[in-house]
Amino acid sequence: MGAVVIVRYKSGGRVEAGVFLLDTYCLGVKNAFFHQCDEAELPDLVQRMCGGGFGGPPTEHSGAWGRKLVEGAMEYARRLGFAPHRHYKQAARVLGGINPKDCAETFVFGRDGKPYFIAGPDDGEARCNLILRILTKKLGPQGFVFTMPGQGFREFFGNEGQADDDHDEDDEDDMDDE
């Protein structure tokens, strides 16, 4: 998990920022928003979004690097059956004119060649079970790895890190409304 903040500088000391919370292991763009502020407020925004809990202090990269990472994570998640956060299009306003081909870096998604779903602190049982059903339907029970908080996730409570085959085949839509 990590955050990417892509900034456009406007006239009069104003900035526009697209903020993307990324899960490069599975879900892609988990959260996104567009923010306008004065340039003087930008360091605080970056610190709040990127400074705590993501493995170190924020680092600066090119817009092409940021766009390539964000869009790559989004496409990886879409192939798995997950849509980007509902505010992605708003946040993506800042990506116009940035060419991801200007970034030579290659990003790898998933972990050890498989999607890896890590349930977050705000992911309830129903949401986690839905994600696991989508992954199981798409990849089979051995096609991904997951980590769940504690017990209570009975539908998939089997071997640690593997989904049970025993579940109902509800019609799952992309998780666009999360």
Image (cartoon, grey):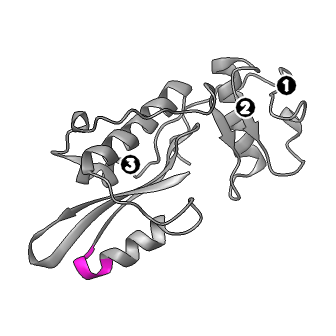
Q: Mark 3 sits on what residue?
A: 88
The amino acid sitting under disc 1 is Asp
Above or below, 162 relative to 150:
above
Query: Residue 93: which numbered mark, if any?
Result: none
Residue 167, horizontal then vertical, whole percent: 82, 25
Query: Is 173 inside the magenta-drawn segment?
Result: no
Mark 3 Cα within 10 Å, few/some/many (few <14, many 20+)? Answer: many
Structural distance between the alpha carbons of marks 2 and 1: 12 Å
Q: What is the number of callouts on the image?
A: 3
Q: What is the residue that sits farthest to the left in this orientation?
A: 11
Q: Are marks 1 and 3 in contact (CB under 8 Å)?
A: no
Instruction: Give the secondary structure at mark 3.
Output: helix
Mark 1 Cα within 10 Å, few/some/many (few <14, many 20+)? Answer: some
| Residue drawn where x is 43% and y is 31% of the image | 75
Query: Residue 145: which numbered mark, if any?
Result: 2
Q: Mark 1 sits on what residue?
A: 164
Structural distance between the alpha carbons of marks 1 and 3: 32 Å
Mark 2 Cα within 10 Å, few/some/many (few <14, many 20+)? Answer: many
Residue 98, horizontal then vertical, whole percent: 19, 44
Structural distance between the alpha carbons of marks 3 and 2: 26 Å
Above or below, 171 relative to 84:
above
Q: Where does the magenta region start and end?
A: 37-41
Residue 131, horizontal then vertical, whole percent: 67, 36
Q: In the image, 115: left or right of 82?
A: right
| Residue drawn where x is 33% and y is 54% of the image | 91
Instruction: Give the secondary structure at mark 2.
Output: strand
Q: In terms of sequence position, does the residue under pointer 3 or pointer 2 come before the other?
A: 3
